[in-house]
Image: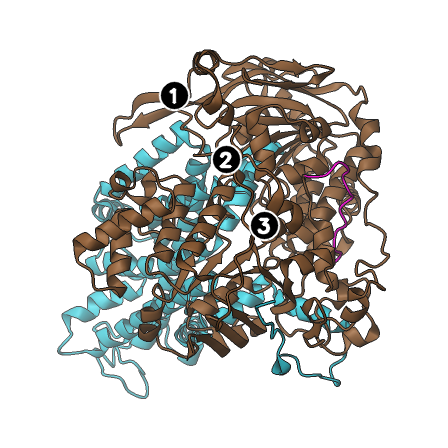
Chain colours: A cyan, B brown
Amino acid sequence: MSTDARAGAPSGAPVRPDAEPPRAARPAREHAHLGLGRLYARRFARNRLAVAGAVILALLVLFAALGGHLTRYAYTDADFTALTAPPSGVHWFGTNQGGNDVYACAVHGLQRSLTIAVSVSVLTVVLAAVIGSGAAYFGGRVERATLAVIHFLLVVPSFLILALVSHRLAGDWRVLIIVLTVFGWMSTARVIWAVSTSLRERDYVKAAEFMGVGPLRVILRHLIPNLGSLLIVNLTLGVVATVLSETALSFLGFGVQTPDVSLGTMLADGATTLTSAPWLFAFPAGLLVLLTVSMTLIGDGLRDALDPTSATGSAGGRR
Amino acid sequence: MTLATPLLDPAPGKDGRPVLSVRDLHITFPSEAGPVQAVRGVGFDLLPGRTLCVVGESGSGKSATALGVMGLLPPSAEVRGQVLLDGQDLVGLDDRALSKIRGKSIGMVFQDPLSALTPIYSVGRLLADALRVHQDLTRRAAWEQAVQLLDLVGIPDPRGRATAFPHEFSGGMRQRVVIALAIANRPAVLVADEPTTALDVTVQAQILDVLRLAQQETGAGLVLITHDLGVVAGHADDVAVMYAGRFVEHAGVTELFRRPTMPYTARLLAAVPTVDGGVRRPLVPIGGEPPALVDLPAGCPFAPRCAVALDACRTAEPESHEVTGHGHVACLRAAEIADGSLDPKGDTPPAGPPAPADRTATATATGEVVLRVEDLVKTFPVTKGAVLKRRIGTLRAVGGVGFALRAGETLALVGESGSGKTTTLMEILRLARPEGGRVEICGTDVAALDSPAAVRRLRRDVQIVMQDPLGALDPRMPVSHSLAEPLRAIGRDRASIRARVRELLALVGLDDTIGDRFPAALSGGQRQRVGIARALATEPRLLALDEPLSALDVSVQAGVINLLTRLKRELGLAYLVVAHDLAVVRYVSDRIAVMYLGHIVETGDTEAIFADPRHPYTRALLSAIPIPDPGRERTRERVVLTGEPPNAARPPRGCVFVDRCPLYREAGEELRRRCRTEPPAQTPVAGDSGHRYACHGV
């Protein structure tokens, strides 16, 4: 023969008398198949920025939840001995024109903003997932009608309507949650619809149909769980978007109304005295930046961790 | 009948230095679970004009070896060893230096011809560019050479087709273009990675011949990577069998097939279904699974699946050593096997009962008719325009198909892609009024089903096993939930579902613990078993199997075939199998219906079709399948079909096969006229009323 084999050259397989021989194969196999949750956690943890984002978010949540216990002032208390006072040992972040403690306001405002943002984001994603994947699954007339509604709502200047509606129902932050949800689900639903149209063609969806599984079950059990990563990423980025639009609304005077406080109303108040009393603006602005940056970092990290083809999350290119 | 010349003898081994030498090649990929040692110490020499076939199952490292030779591995891969091309070591060269060599000294033929061609350039431009990168040619001279190359690889009207774009070519023609690209600069080495896997079997034969011609034309050494032992038997000079990243056996092709000396090779050969010969031998699956290449245990990686393993096999991995008169084998017991004193297949009994014994009993059984299809028609509109879709034609995917299927019987619909076999299956499973004709399941006409409840009742009797077992299982659901789903759909209560799931797992030979795992954590064979178990959950009477074996490796294929045979016998099921692989079909089916362009051209008992094929298309299909035996594969007469199936939107008026028919080309004027104008009727074969064919010429 003409080709010369040198398969398994000496260095290929050194004899390892110390390795336990027969049972070694099994643990190796199990090791190769990590649980999905642990796999994602590991990929997420590999992204340093994402971990930093998670730490910042955790600190912010702690601050919003427990920060109020560290001061003797409530956000409604007015200290008439210190109006527009700069930060000091008594008022850590200073006070505003009404003598309210800015630290206490910031804690409460952050709490309010976070609550609104998280609930709006969750509600939006749930609504969008059901409508988007439903439209994709049923197809035909249902799909066309749903898309028409989505496209109509998308071209209408929703921020304007939002401003009007929230002004009329003013004040209550719960109303704000509903209004923000009703006018915020469309673009997410559009994306989810687009992804679901490809999921609809998957073999396991067809298999479920051939088994006689009902449409609602197919959507809830097969389509939505497989949109998981998209939904989670939309959830985190939705928090950022909601905080910003709530802040913007409140800044314009349409959102949370006095005496309630959110980061947005604080920013609106502080902006007028930016040169004379900068601390009124600086502290809520700083908190807002921290919140949005941490959420963005977490969102990016999750996207990379959940996407098996992403290079950042994997051990070095190929898995 | 056109008979191709018998395959040429292997190219004479020219004396000379090897064009490619690989020495102790190691390739490691990083992964979540730790480094994957995809290739562990591979080495070979390739002489000019010779063909080295590398065979192995998926995950054995054969593609990684090819990419390593070409320097096309992702940057994260770690490569050690030497790849010597004309004395120059390619390992460690940077991309720019490698680019000078790739395409000029090494040509590569990829598996998927569509993604290997840039869609925005004409094929002439692609070829001319490939030539001008490495040679100093004028635009015009390069174009002329490109046309010559297209002519060489058998593209009709090469000058006209050079201006066409890749998407205007069919799969086989595209692969010819890829081969032309690979040999454009007359490389010394050609690497072909599964060049025919994406193609139909009649086209595969054409492409392999083109590859051989291209090799002779350039005198290049060819490294042909494949999983098909039949292709190996027909085309290799030397064979290397890969397992767990190593060459476990490396020998000349005749020696290897005469006496496989590594137990893995022997078992692999025993597990391959074949189409030739009078008697079907039972397939013997290799138990177990190939090892994961992460943290390989000490010892021979095949030892856990080996029937003749010794204790020593489990402690140290055997070196590859020369066996006199054979080649190189990495097995401690190679000498005993080579001199015939040890049977490498061991004395393990086959996992399932041998298939042939019971077939006569069931085939002739007069079970009730479970499925009756008459004159089924399915068309698709061909539209043009993006906004206002105009209907410019009709594609007749299925044109009047009819058959009946009894309980305990298996009918296989066989044909190439585009023959309408899967469309037929889907039309039956839709359980709705067909466009034309009748579908009757268990005595119920599906057109008469008036309520969704009635459809759901009938769904219990008809279930499907899909082609891709991974795609058919929801990746986010553990196996037990997937199995419970059809039961929940018919409203069973929790306790009985749990009991039934356990029963189903046992029925398909799976362990109870599998129920908690996710599909991604299962092997290919286990996944397909889960797919079958799910289909059986509602105790159906008719099981539709859409290419149930094509996604599986040879060594596990046999196990699934045996499982299907056993289930049919135990449960009295009727199978409707759709497949393109006649060799596999032979082992699972009682009757075969051969489809071409939406029509059944021949139908009959499996053995009758194999023993006495009447229709020229059936004959061509049978002879296109490579036989894993070099002696017979290289000497038998073959019917080679030219061209590819025509567009179903414009089917011929008479016989659908007329464009490619070898009989038509030799027929007289009168017969030709009939073939062109008159659709042939189904004619029974004398003495066998079940065997019918539709041809004017036989």
Instruction: State which region is magenta.
Output: B276-289
Q: How crowded is mark 2: few (under 14 residues within 10 Å), some or many (20 or more)?
A: some
At which x and y percent is residue B275?
Answer: 67, 39
| Image height of B616 relative to B528, above or below | above
| Image height of B325 relative to A80, above or below | above
Q: Nearer the viewer, mark 3 or mark 1?
A: 3
Residue kind at label 1, given as amino acid type: Thr
Q: Is mark 2 on a helix, strand or loop?
A: loop
Q: Tell me, for residue B417, which label it has, or none.
A: 2
Q: Which residue is drawn at 85% across and 56% down?
A: B348
Q: Which of marks 2 and 3 is in front?
A: 3
Residue kind at label 2, given as amino acid type: Ser
* Chain identifier of the residue bearing label 1 in the image: B
Q: How far apart are marks 3 and 1 (CA)?
A: 41 Å
Q: Do the residues labelled 1 and 2 touch (CB within 8 Å)?
A: no
Can the viewer see residue A319?
A: no
